[in-house]
Amino acid sequence: MTANDIYNFYNNIRVNNKPNAIDFENMRKFFKSVNIYISKKLSEFPNMKKNDKEFWSKLILGYSQLKGLKNGYNFEILRNGGKNKTLEIEDFLIIQSDGEIPELLSYYKLKKDISVIQEKRLNLMTRTSLN
């Protein structure tokens, strides 16, 4: 019942951040790396120490719900012919982070600005040392 609403909500987030498309994609890559890390940790669950299992067992519950939401959403979207509207875990993590997206995007802008500054300093240092 809510598959189209979920897609519209996600699409609005994407469209509203179109001026920051590169930063938005970097944020999406970050959430993808979070997904990979969590999946790896969860695969190690059987061999974890008891204290670690207590922590990760709670994450498993929430993460299982998120995967179920993604699978149910994609099933419904595909059933209705919306192949180009499927979403990944990282997209659902973005939806969950909706209120923090401006802050997350400003982090990626700041990170990019710092990289540019560092590159300019390196170029300046290189030119100075060559003289």
Image: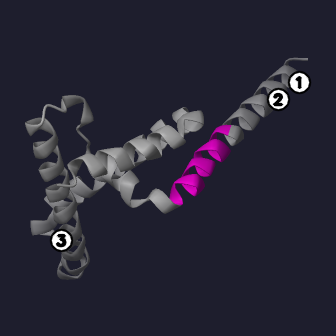
Q: Is residue 37 above or below residue 17?
A: below
| Residue 13: percent from left, percent from top | 46, 46
Residue underneath mark 2? 125
Count residues near mark 3 (Cα–Cα under 10 Å), then give few for <14, some for 14-19, many for 20+: few
Q: How many marks?
A: 3
Q: Relative to 80, is 129 on the left or the right?
A: right
Residue underneath mark 3? 61
Task: Name which residue type carries label 2.
Answer: Met
Query: Do the residues under discs 3 and 1 have CB atoms within 8 angstroms?
Result: no
Judging depth in this view, the residue of 65 and 78 nearest the camera is: 78
| Residue 51: percent from left, percent from top | 23, 82
The answer for how far apart the CA atoms under marks 3 and 1 are is 56 Å
Position of the C terminus, as image quadrant, is top right
Task: Find residue 128 and name its label.
Answer: 1
| Residue 114: percent from left, percent from top | 70, 42
Mark 2 lies on a secondary structure that is helix
Task: Name which residue type carries label 3.
Answer: Leu
Check the image and tell me how it is coloured.
one colour
